[in-house]
């Protein structure tokens, strides 16, 4: 890890370790430049492999950190404050861990746990632009029988994290059109990763197109959907949604840091009609800092409260007694959290420039990345549609959708 300390031999860096804090500081140091110049964080992802941060949620008996979801989301917020692109690139990895490497009844669980414990990272290929409904199936990506295994063909878009991953999980239709997850190494013959994501924000999340051309798939690399397992669990995507919101909260933490640095550095050159000589003494600008600080606190508090609700639902599943009501409540809390955190962050990203003035708009500062990144993440899951579902739930008790974006 260059001059950074290596993790202990029996697991990943601890969330409360000085080594993790130094790693996060190192990641933050180059984040603005990477975003401005579009420099992919390959070196950072290698450091994350070495630190085995992808194994934080893996049980300690499997070589993981054994952390709760609350503890994991707290780390994600800190990582997103350092670089939201890096945090987002790990989103699908963390959902893979909870779907397929933690549950005792998961198919081929020992294999996935072993790979994750050693530091391997997993991406995801799910989205197909030909689907009439975003996030919906059926898939045109097909798995067909081939001797004692399978062959895979198709194209996936917005494959977040896959450009930096060791393996990619592909959602596909099986030989009999049953839904399946296909997990193959990214360097398998026939797998092509295209760096073509050109979004306004989150530019370095490794979210390009994945082409699959006659890819050989072994039997133990396929997990067919089944009730109560992986994608067959109600609200199995709540964690994925909450991870996005945690990243947005991390952006807000970084906005606060930049706002304080900006105003603290403005000791001279204030507007002639201001009430103070120095910007850093201006009570109006100090008020904005206070508002951003309060928003950052609220955002993180909400994310961690939503994570605790998710922990309760996860614990019930771990105990072999999945509780539909706990899962629903966790989805409700996550949805409410998203709406508030998105709004607070996007507003704060704009108010940052009230603190910094026109000089804060200089391209070399790249402070507009906060708004671009937060706005891009918020658009992944449209707020008005989520708010409508919550309104229907409050008015009529209509359960939230159980799959996809809830």
Image (cartoon, rainbow, N blue to C red):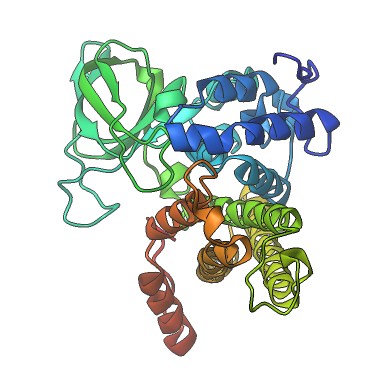
Count the marks: how many? 0
Query: In the rendered image, which quarter contains the C terminus?
Result: bottom left
| Left or right relative to 333: residue 213 | left
| Left or right relative to 318: residue 406 | left
Residue 142 seen in render:
no
Q: Is residue 325 above or below residue 369?
A: below
* Residue 396 x, y percent position in the rendering: 43, 87
Q: Nearer the viewer, residue 208 or 150?
A: 208
* Residue 179 x, y percent position in the rendering: 29, 40
Residue 83 seen in render:
yes
| Left or right relative to 91: residue 301 | right
Q: Nearer the viewer, residue 380 or 322?
A: 380
| Left or right relative to 4: residue 255 | left
Q: Is residue 66 above or below residue 317?
A: above
Q: Splitting the image into 4 quarters, where does residue 30 fall?
A: top right
* Residue 312 x, y percent position in the rendering: 68, 58
Q: Residue at x 40, y 39 (%)?
A: 203
Query: In the rendered image, which quarter contains the N terminus?
Result: top right
Q: Residue furthest bottom?
A: 395
Q: Residue furthest front?
A: 272
Q: Nearer the viewer, residue 209 or 363?
A: 363
Q: Is residue 302 above or below residue 54?
A: below
Q: Residue at x 80, y 19 (%)?
A: 8
* Residue 269 x, y percent position in the rendering: 67, 61
Q: Residue at x 50, y 25 (%)?
A: 108
């Amino acid at each position: 890890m260059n001059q950074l300390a290596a993790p202990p031999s029996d697991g990943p860096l601890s969330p409360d370790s000085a080594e993790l804090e130094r790693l996060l500081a190192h990641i933050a140091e180059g984040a603005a430049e990477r975003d401005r110049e579009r420099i992919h964080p390959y070196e950072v992802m290698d450091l994350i492999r070495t630190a085995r941060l992808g194994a934080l949620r893996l049980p300690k008996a499997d070589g993981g950190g054994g952390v709760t979801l609350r503890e994991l989301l707290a780390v994600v917020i800190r990582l997103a404050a350092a670089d939201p692109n890096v945090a987002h690139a790990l989103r699908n990895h963390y959902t893979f861990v909870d779907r397929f490497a933690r549950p005792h009844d998961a198919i081929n669980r020992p294999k996935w746990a072993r790979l994750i414990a050693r530091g391997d990272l997993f991406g995801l290929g799910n989205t197909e632009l030909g689907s009439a409904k975003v996030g919906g199936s059926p898939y045109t990506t097909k798995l067909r029988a081939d001797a004692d295994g399978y062959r895979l063909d198709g194209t996936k878009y917005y494959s977040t994290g896959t450009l930096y991953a060791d393996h990619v999980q592909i959602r596909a239709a099986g030989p009999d059109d049953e839904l399946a997850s296909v997990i193959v190494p990214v360097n398998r013959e026939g797998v092509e990763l295209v760096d073509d994501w050109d979004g306004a924000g989150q530019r370095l999340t490794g979210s390009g197109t994945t082409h699959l051309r006659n890819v050989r798939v072994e039997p133990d690399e396929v997990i067919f959907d089944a009730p109560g397992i992986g994608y067959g669990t109600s609200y199995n995507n709540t964690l994925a949604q909450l991870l996005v919101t945690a990243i947005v909260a991390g952006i807000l933490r970084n906005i606060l840091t930049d706002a304080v640095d900006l105003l603290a550095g403005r000791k001279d050159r204030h507007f002639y009609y201001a009430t103070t000589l120095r910007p850093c003494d201006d009570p109006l600008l100090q008020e904005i800092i206070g508002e951003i600080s309060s928003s950052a606190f609220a955002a993180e508090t909400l994310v961690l409260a939503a994570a605790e609700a998710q922990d309760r639902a996860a614990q019930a599943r771990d105990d072999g007694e999945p509780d539909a009501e706990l899962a629903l409540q966790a989805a409700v809390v996550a949805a409410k959290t998203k709406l508030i955190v998105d709004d607070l962050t996007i507003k704060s990203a704009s108010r940052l420039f009230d603190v910094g003035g026109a000089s804060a708009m200089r391209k070399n500062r790249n402070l507009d990345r906060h708004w671009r990144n937060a706005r891009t993440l918020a658009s992944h899951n449209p707020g008005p549609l989520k708010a409508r579902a919550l309104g229907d739930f409050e008015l009529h008790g209509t359960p939230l959708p159980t799959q996809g974006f809830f």
